[in-house]
Image (spheres, rainbow, N blue to C red):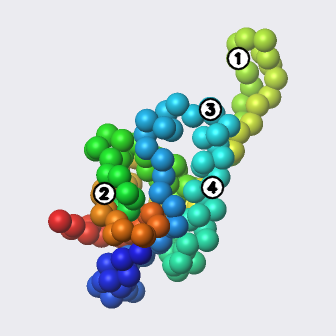
Amino acid sequence: MNSKLLEEYENRFAGKGTWVLKCPAVPPSGNITKRMHWTAYAHLMEMWYLLIRSSDGFLTVTLPSGKRFVNIIRYSKRSLDRDNLYTSVKPVVDALKPSLKQSGVYKSGKKVGQAWTRQRVGHGLLVEDNDSSLELKVINGTLPKRTKPYTLIVISDFPIIEG
């Protein structure tokens, strides 16, 4: 890992409404996730939920009071094009959203009248992932040789300008 970059973020924004989370994995490309079976995608979502929960700095992040600015830097051997890059971080952003439990009744088909429930796991570090409560920027990071891929998530209550 580029510890200088992590130190720079921590020193520049420490205690100022900005948190840095380092996860020891990178999300798969958007082309890979769109071809996944739904159960494999559910396992991917659960993995990112646990990776974020176990990352350094997770316990210091406060609950959101409004719009959050999130920079996700994906360090891997291959850089992705823009559409694959943004699509690849969907499981990460979904794990940052709050948990949600929904229920209802089937209105058509073979199960008419039967009850259904579903639950989305999340940490609640974002209010929601819509434009009014999230500003997202995803960056391809360069990875030095013989370094394992990782993802850096920078969550802030104010805009961070990156070059």
Tag 3 and tag 1, C-beta contact below 8 Å: no
Q: CA distance from mark 4 to mark 1?
A: 33 Å
Tag 2 and tag 4, C-beta contact below 8 Å: no
Tag 4 and tag 3, C-beta contact below 8 Å: no
Mark number, residue 60: none
Q: CA distance from mark 3 to mark 1?
A: 26 Å
Under circle 1, the secondary element is loop
Reading the image, the residue beneath label 4 is 47
> Image height check: is 117 above or below 75?
above
> Badge 1: few (under 14), some or many (20 or more) residues near its Cα, within 10 Å?
few
Under circle 4, the secondary element is helix
Q: Residue furthest left?
A: 163
Q: Is residue 29 something that shows in the picture?
A: yes
Give the left or right position of residue 108, taking residue 138 as reference.
Answer: right
Which of the two discs, 3 and 2, labels the residue nearer the N terminus?
A: 3
> Badge 2: few (under 14), some or many (20 or more) residues near its Cα, within 10 Å?
some
| Numbered disc in front, either 3 or 1 | 3
Q: Residue at x 30, y 58 (%)?
A: 139
Q: How many marks overall?
A: 4
